[in-house]
Image (cartoon, rainbow, N blue to C red):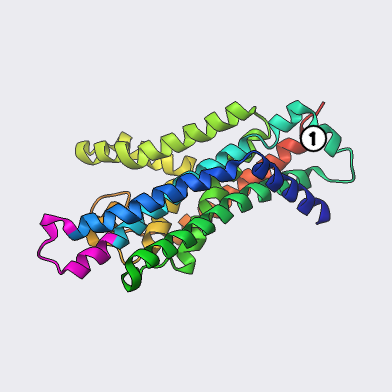
Amino acid sequence: MRQLLLITSITLREALRKKVWLWAFVILAGLIVIDSIVPRAFSQADRLQMMPQEERLRQGIFTAQFVGARIILFFTCIIAIVLAAGQISAEIDKGVLSSVVTKPIFRFQVVMGKWLGVVLFADVIILLCIGVNWALCSAIYGHLAGYAINWPMLGVMLLYPVLYGTLTIAFSSFGSMVMSLMLTATLYSFTFIGDTIIHIIAEITQNESLRKLEVLSDWLIPHGRLATWFGSLEQGMVPAMRREMGRRAGEHLTYTSFDQFYIFAYIIGFLLLANIVFSRRDLN
């Protein structure tokens, strides 16, 4: 356990040294802009004049926090991917790990320590940004900022960096830093295209081959399953915005216990793959 925590602390210090934490300011800047503009845009929208002024502002706050949550998730996933990509292969190339494994430490402790450091770093940024976002809305809009992320929803948000950090660590166990980044980006692009563009075309054409391709994208990386789970927990949104959270327009967000099982099995599977590959890799 001591060796595991040592590797974790080294990974966290390395992330701080590389100034990856500066990305948190990018996230916070985006949240400030969204929280300042979107609610006021709702309160001044001509198309919503039939609603009371306070209700328009409240719906604007809900929408701003809806968008803000996705800004946080997008950038923290990038942080996790960038940090994880250089954790194994890059340090093998530098000769760092060849000296580390000669000490009384198991290889699986190296992988798990680096994985834990990446996940903790990204998840702490999520918690920080969520807290700042809530405090900012409360300071600007007072009692109207009643929307707060519940604990189950927060737990699902924390899984996003876990998913992408694990995936990239696994790729880094056998590929270079650039390859790890490219493989993760390719899988993310495929699942994103499957959940949006391919789905729309499949709905229009009613083509079964496209439907199968869409399903395949959800198996390759469970981003869509995670998004559905997250969206189904989100409360207080305007009905139109809530529908937009779904992968299929007009359908209610639904997730199953199998979706949850597949997400966790996927993460555990790639974590095991990283340990197996690294345990057999020549570090010289």
Residue at 39%, 53% (x, y): give it: 32
The image quadrant where one finds the N terminus is bottom right
* SS state under label 1: helix
How many numbered discs?
Answer: 1
Taking depth in this image into account, of 140 and 65 the one nearest to the observer is 140
Which residue is pictured at 62% across the width and 43% down the height?
270
Q: Position of residue 254 (x, y in %)?
A: 36, 59
Magenta extent: 44-60
Q: Is residue 76 visible?
A: no
| Amino acid type shown at disc 1 | Leu
Label 1 Cα crowd, 10 Å radius (few <14 / some 14-19 / many 20+): some
Q: Position of residue 188 (x, y in %)?
A: 46, 38
Q: Nearer the viewer, residue 41 or 69?
A: 41
Q: Is residue 210 left or right of residue 190?
A: left
Relative to 20, residue 182 above or below: above
Residue 228 position (above or below residue 186): below
Name the foreground residue: 195 vs 128: 128
Residue annotated with mark 1: 97
Q: In which quadrant will I find the C terminus?
A: top right
Q: Nearer the viewer, residue 237 or 244?
A: 237
Q: Is residue 237 left or right of residue 88?
A: left
Q: Residue at x 89, y 38 (%)?
A: 102
Helix, strand or loop: magenta stretch: helix
Res. 161 visible in picture: yes
Which residue in the rendered view is the most extreme toward the bottom? 143
Describe residue 254's horizontal placement relative to residue 281 as left or right.
Answer: left
- Relative image position of residue 62 (x, y in whole percent): 31, 62
Which x, y percent locates residue 72?
45, 50
The residue that appears at 45% across and 51% down in the rendered structure is: 28
Q: Is residue 154 magenta?
A: no
